[in-house]
């Protein structure tokens, strides 16, 4: 499947914006772990200027604000709805594709959670982030690895996210800039859902169905359900596995 266009991604997240926060339990846990790791490496000292891209409903924004206060905060997202997150934090909001908008000033902390997987070339963006950072500044990013939703991939469903990369690959992209990440690590989280339909509902609510070119027919749904049930049943339902990846790096002072 080719990468969905920014407008398809924005549309999918706008549609699911109100349901995302309630449904995105793994994404919430991922942001907590990202902030925990950042704090373990950097401490809680206030930042001068934080830039976050792909802020969405603000899981990361909220968690970061509680742990690392900042004098100035700039948030970006493709969707207009994310302006609410910026308003809640008194932040500047930059709407648009993070690859093409002008970035603000010289941040000393750049963060992002669960967004780089939507980019066909996350390496270029991460290198731009390192270049944009103030000397001694920090980068804290999470994405997803190639085993993301392994159940769907096993059943032959192409994921709409072109930028899946394991921790080692993320680290190697920064290595090209001579930067050795302090943390690059990953996990496999098999989540349980009551049924394959429930899996689809979760995907829809968390915006992951962006890029599907045609709606599901009754026949598609029946085939999906029976294949899924046959291969990924547990005593309580079925699994859907997340493969989160975390990267923390510091630009030399
Ligand atoms: C899965 S959500 C994550 C939101 C939030 N960071 C979190 O952890 O809950 C991904 C967000 O990235 C945004 N996004 C995807 N591609 C983007 C791009 N090229 N530029 C800016 N934002 C993008 C989407 O609109 C969406 O709000």
Image (cartoon, rainbow, N blue to C red):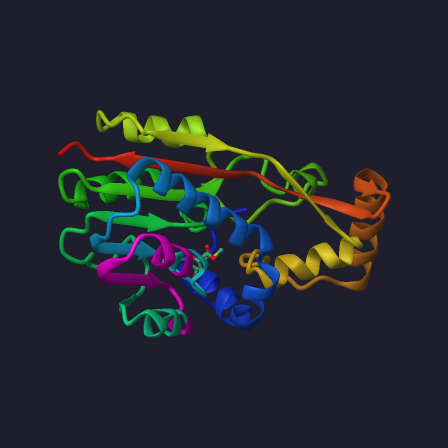
Up the image or down, 186 lies above or below 95; here it is above
Left or right of 80, for residue 241: right
What range is drawn magenta here? Answer: 62-81
67 in relation to 130, above or below: below
Residue 112, percent across and down?
Answer: 37, 50
Q: Position of residue 248 (x, y in %)?
A: 34, 36
What residue sits 56% from the left and 38% below the top? 243
Whether residue 221 is situated above or below residue 158 in the rendered picture? below
Q: Position of residue 197 (x, y in %)?
A: 76, 58
Where residue 51 sits in the image (x, y, percent)? 26, 55
Count of residue discs:
0
Residue beneath the point at 39% across and 74% down:
84
Ligand 1 visible in quadrant? bottom left
Q: Is residue 172 left or right of residue 49?
A: right
Residue 148 in the figure: left or right of residue 163: right
Residue at point 33% right, 55% down?
53
Quadrant where the C terminus is found in the figure: top left
Judge whether residue 229 is colored magenta: no
Q: Quadrant of residue 64?
A: bottom left
Quadrant of the rendered structure where residue 242 is? top right
Q: Is residue 43 visible?
A: yes
Magenta stretch holds residue 69? yes
Whether residue 54 is visible, yes or no, is: no
Q: Is residue 123 left or right of residue 237?
A: left
Where is residue 123, by image quadrant? top left
Looking at the image, which residue is at 25% across and 38% down?
Answer: 127
Front-most of residues 23 and 124? 23
């Amino acid at each position: 499947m080719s990468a969905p266009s920014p407008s398809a991604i924005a549309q999918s997240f706008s549609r699911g914006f109100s349901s995302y926060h309630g449904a995105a339990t793994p994404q919430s846990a991922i942001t907590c772990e990202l902030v925990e790791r950042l704090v373990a490496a950097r401490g809680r000292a206030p930042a001068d200027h934080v830039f976050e891209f792909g802020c969405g409903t603000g899981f990361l924004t909220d968690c970061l604000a509680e742990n690392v206060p900042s004098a100035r905060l700039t948030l970006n997202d493709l969707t207009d709805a994310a302006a609410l997150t910026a308003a809640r934090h008194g932040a500047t909001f930059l709407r648009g594709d993070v690859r093409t908008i002008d970035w603000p000033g010289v941040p000393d902390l750049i963060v992002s959670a669960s967004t780089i997987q939507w980019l066909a070339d996350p390496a270029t963006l991460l290198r731009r982030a390192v270049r944009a950072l103030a000397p001694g500044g920090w980068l804290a990013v999470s994405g997803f690895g190639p085993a993301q939703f392994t159940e769907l991939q096993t059943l032959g469903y192409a994921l709409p996210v072109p930028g899946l990369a394991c921790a080692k690959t993320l680290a190697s992209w920064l290595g090209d800039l001579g930067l050795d990440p302090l943390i690059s690590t990953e996990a496999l989280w098999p989540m349980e859902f009551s049924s394959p339909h429930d899996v689809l509902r979760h995907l829809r609510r968390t915006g992951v169905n962006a890029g599907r070119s045609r709606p599901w027919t009754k026949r598609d749904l029946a085939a999906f359900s029976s294949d899924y049930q046959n291969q990924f049943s547990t005593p309580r339902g079925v699994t859907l596995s997340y493969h989160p990846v975390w990267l923390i790096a510091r630009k030399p002072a």
